[in-house]
């Protein structure tokens, strides 16, 4: 668990330095899978698939993670087109209500992050407590949930401004209506995924929703595709890179101990 978490943290730190909105979900999956294979072989990993609509195991999680970005882009595109249709006769005095509506959409997006991304952290801690014999089930104690929520809140307050600039400016120059559509579409996808029990990457969904808004404005040329490509390459390499790093860290740990 330590090797997997350290690998995920190292990769996320590198992505933050580069200003790339990487997926902590992908990094966590890759790190834990790499460490498990290095520790006990491929049979130690629950590769899984689907239990009805609910993803289980590594393969199910990877499918959910892969489907989330196109869903985020599509949702933002649809929301933006609907907003633009409804406000086609609006004057500039509607700009302030649009900005105020972002308090609601951003609140729903934050709720979605807590309902999905934070649960991965809680799951890791709950697994450790179960393995250690501290608890008898994966039901997390309140202090675990509170600690995960506090950590996410502190991270938000401190701000990863490199990531903020990439999402808000480097992919596509967001205006007030764009941001409202992006937040609303992202929140719908993340909250829906949480209800389905599907762990998705909030980072992927939000970044993809920005592209969806740009497409909704029919301004392909305004989207900075070089940045989108760089982010996409980082996403594709996250799982194998963190898996290899975690396996290497576990090997070093065993040599030292």
Image (cartoon, rainbow, N blue to C red):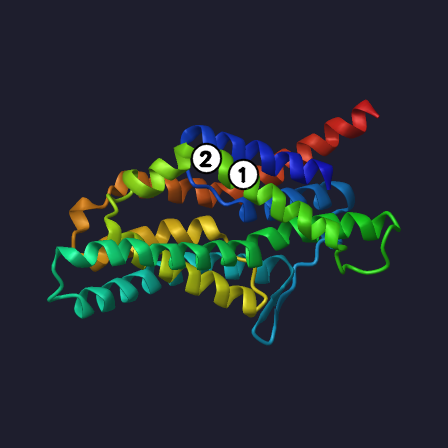
Foreground residue among 193 and 158: 158
Foreground residue among 45 and 198: 198
Lateral position of residue 195 relative to residue 16, left or right: right
Asked whether the residues under the numbered discs 1 and 2 touch, taking CB atoms below 8 Å apart as contact, a structural biologist would say: yes
**Secondary structure type for disc 1:** helix
Instruction: Find residue 112 and report its horizontal and vertical position in percent.
Output: 50, 58
In the displayed structure, 20 sits above or below 179; it is above
Q: CA distance from mark 1 to mark 2?
A: 8 Å
Which residue lies at the image location 13% right of the left edge and 66% below the top edge? 88
Q: What mark, if any, has residue 155 been given in the picture?
A: 1
Lateral position of residue 60 relative to residue 256, left or right: left
**Secondary structure type for disc 2:** loop
Which residue lies at the image location 46% right of the left edge and 35% below the top edge? 159
Instruction: Find residue 98 and report its horizontal and vertical position in percent.
Output: 26, 57
Q: Is residue 70 visible?
A: no
Instruction: Find residue 2 and report its horizontal and vertical position in percent.
Output: 72, 37
Lateral position of residue 168 relative to residue 222, left or right: right
- Location of residue 248 (image quadrant): top right
Q: Residue furthest top?
A: 256
Q: What mark, if any, has residue 4 been given in the picture?
A: none
């Amino acid at each position: 668990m330590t090797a997997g978490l350290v690998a995920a943290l190292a990769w996320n730190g590198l992505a933050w330095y580069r200003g790339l909105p990487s997926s902590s979900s992908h990094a966590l999956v890759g790190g834990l899978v790499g460490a498990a294979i290095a520790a006990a072989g491929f049979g130690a990993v629950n590769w899984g698939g689907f239990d009805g609509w609910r993803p289980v195991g590594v393969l199910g999680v990877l499918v959910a993670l892969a489907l989330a970005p196109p869903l985020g882009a599509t949702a933002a595109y649809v929301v933006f087109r609907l907003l633009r249709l409804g406000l086609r006769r609006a004057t500039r005095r509607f700009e302030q209500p649009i900005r105020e509506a972002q308090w609601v959409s951003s609140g729903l997006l934050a709720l979605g992050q807590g309902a999905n991304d934070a649960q991965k952290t809680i799951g890791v801690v709950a697994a450790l407590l179960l393995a250690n014999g501290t608890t008898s089930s994966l039901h997390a104690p309140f202090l675990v949930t509170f600690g995960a929520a506090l950590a996410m809140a502190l991270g938000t307050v401190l701000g990863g401004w490199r990531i903020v600039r990439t999402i808000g400016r480097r992919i596509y120059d967001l205006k007030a209506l764009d941001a409202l559509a992006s937040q609303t579409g992202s929140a719908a996808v993340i909250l829906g995924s949480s209800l389905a029990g599907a762990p998705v990457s909030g980072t992927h969904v939000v970044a993809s929703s920005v592209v969806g808004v740009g497409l909704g404005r029919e301004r392909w040329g305004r989207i900075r595709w070089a940045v989108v490509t760089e982010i996409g390459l980082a996403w594709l390499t996250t799982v194998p890179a963190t898996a290899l790093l975690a396996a290497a860290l576990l090997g070093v740990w065993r040599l030292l101990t």
